[in-house]
Image (tube, grey):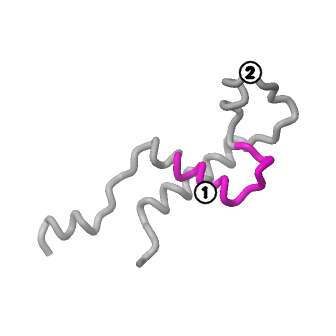
């Protein structure tokens, strides 16, 4: 196997931004609309955030881990 073939089979380490984006998409697909990843948009709009259900850091970390794994090991096509 050539170096080019080996490189093509080895997935590149995804950036933190890509992992975060995938984690948010995965979170959104598995949770009801009333459960939020964060409150940034509400805060930017000057809206109250009291009473909003927001994912905890351990939950977010789990979604980031899963997203990272998905990016490194995409499903076979």
Residue under the image location 36 percent in, 52 percent down: 13
Residue at the limit of the structure toward the bottom, as seen here? 77
- In the rendered image, which residue does mark 1 sit on? 26
Q: Nearer the viewer, residue 53 or 13?
A: 53
x and y percent of residue 65 in the render?
55, 54
x and y percent of residue 39 in the render?
71, 33
Residue under the image location 12 percent in, 71 percent down: 2
Magenta-drawn segment: 21-36
Give SS at disc 2.
loop
Q: Which mark is residue 41?
A: none
9 left or right of 45 in image: left
x and y percent of residue 35 in the render?
77, 47
- Mark before the other along the chain sequence, 2 or 1: 1
Q: CA distance from mark 2 to mark 1?
A: 27 Å
State the count of labels.
2
Q: Which mark is residue 46?
A: 2
Reply yes or no: does residue 32 show up in magenta.
Answer: yes
Residue under the image location 69 percent in, 37 percent down: 38
54 left or right of 77 in image: right
User: Dominant secondary structure of the magenta stretch?
Assistant: helix
Give SS at disc 1.
helix
x and y percent of residue 1 in the render?
14, 75
């Amino acid at each position: 196997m050539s170096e080019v073939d080996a490189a093509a089979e080895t997935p590149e380490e995804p950036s933190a931004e890509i992992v975060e984006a995938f984690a948010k998409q995965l979170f959104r697909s598995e949770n009801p609309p009333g459960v939020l990843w964060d409150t940034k948009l509400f805060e930017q709009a000057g809206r109250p955030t009291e009473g909003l259900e927001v994912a905890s850091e351990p939950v977010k970390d789990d979604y980031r881990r899963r997203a990272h794994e998905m990016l490194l090991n995409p499903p076979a096509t």
